[in-house]
Image (tube, grey):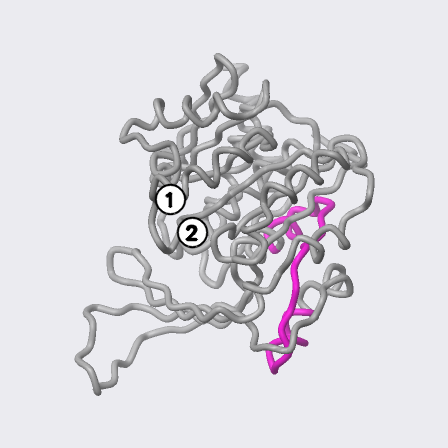
Amino acid sequence: MNKPETQATLYVVGNLNVDLIMSTLQQWPQKGTEAMLESSSLRPGGSAGNCALALAALGTPHRLVANQGKDQFTPWLAELFAASAEHWPQYACETSLTFGVTHPDHERTFFSNQGHIVRLTRQDVLQQLPLTARQDDWVLLCGTFLCTALFSDYPLLLAELKQRGYQVAVDSGWPPQGWSDSLRQQIYPWLRYCDALLLNEVETCGVGDSDSLPTAAARLLAMMPVNARCVVKCGADGAHCWSGEQHLHQAAETLQVVDTIGAGDSFNAGYLSALIYGQDAATALQWGIRVASAAISSSPRHYADWQTLFGCAQQADNQETK
């Protein structure tokens, strides 16, 4: 299987920040004491940043639509995303930074400042996008609740994206303030502009206001356009996709989990790459899981390349011929 051709581009909009990840924290230390941890990693992060790194490894045509602060981290991030950074507006503030610690059960705890991502605006985003989308161009909006200035303009932003002809996907993440009826009422009106929701199981149930995943997904899908997709990432249980009357489930791979940070963002990269290349819904789930699996089973972080997806397609073909 040769890599297919595409004229489409995936624009990833949202939170790019610096991640400082340390592990493993056995228990919370007492105040005023110091704890020594075995390892640390300083790397680009944020939902948009993680997705863009995976897309770059895959060779998927993309651009990271973001902004930047003005401190010692600014040139470092710009160099890592050189093809996109020339378009980023700069704000006279510190770079957004997340400090994360991992625990023995692979769960994480994060501490984040605000920094530049809370200043990203609708105008910042629209100025970095072509006025007219090409066929099959997608925009992925992520880090919804962390990009606070942008979130307040989501209805206007999504309406403009659809007017320009883009297909729109949203991975909102978890709201720091938790789900509430008032927050849901903010979100529901702009679901009519979403061609795909890419949430995890807990987020889907939270915004869908139901403990039943199928019920929550059906509720959200009913507010979305015809033929839209509600994709749910379920970790070790794989991923689901509801669209119209169709429901697909793709099992996860059996692997040794090393680092789960950015798993969902890597999934987004694989899933949307499949759509950019005109693949069907089942293949999109397979690609999403394959890219996420490569990320979470490696340290230092390794992102899947095109040959990884080639192996995925070849493996599926072999199974069909048995």
Question: Is 79 left or right of 227, judged from the image as shown?
Answer: right
**Residue sitting nearer the eye, 62 or 178:** 178
Q: Amino acid at mark 2?
A: Ser
Is residue 74 within the magenta segment?
yes
Q: Position of residue 54 (x, y in %)?
A: 59, 51
* Residue 255 numbered mark, or none: 1
Q: Position of residue 78 (x, y in %)?
A: 69, 69
Q: Are marks 1 and 2 in contact (CB under 8 Å)?
A: yes
Circle 2 crowding by C-alpha within 10 Å: few under 14, some 14–19, many from 20: some
* Residue 181 numbered mark, or none: none
The residues colored magenta run: 53-78
Mark toward the start of the polypeptide (1 vs 2): 1
| In this view, 73 is above or below 247 | below
Residue position for label 2: 297
Q: Quadrant of residue 314?
A: top right
Residue in view at x 74 percent, y 34 percent: 163
Residue in view at x 43 percent, y 28 percent: 240
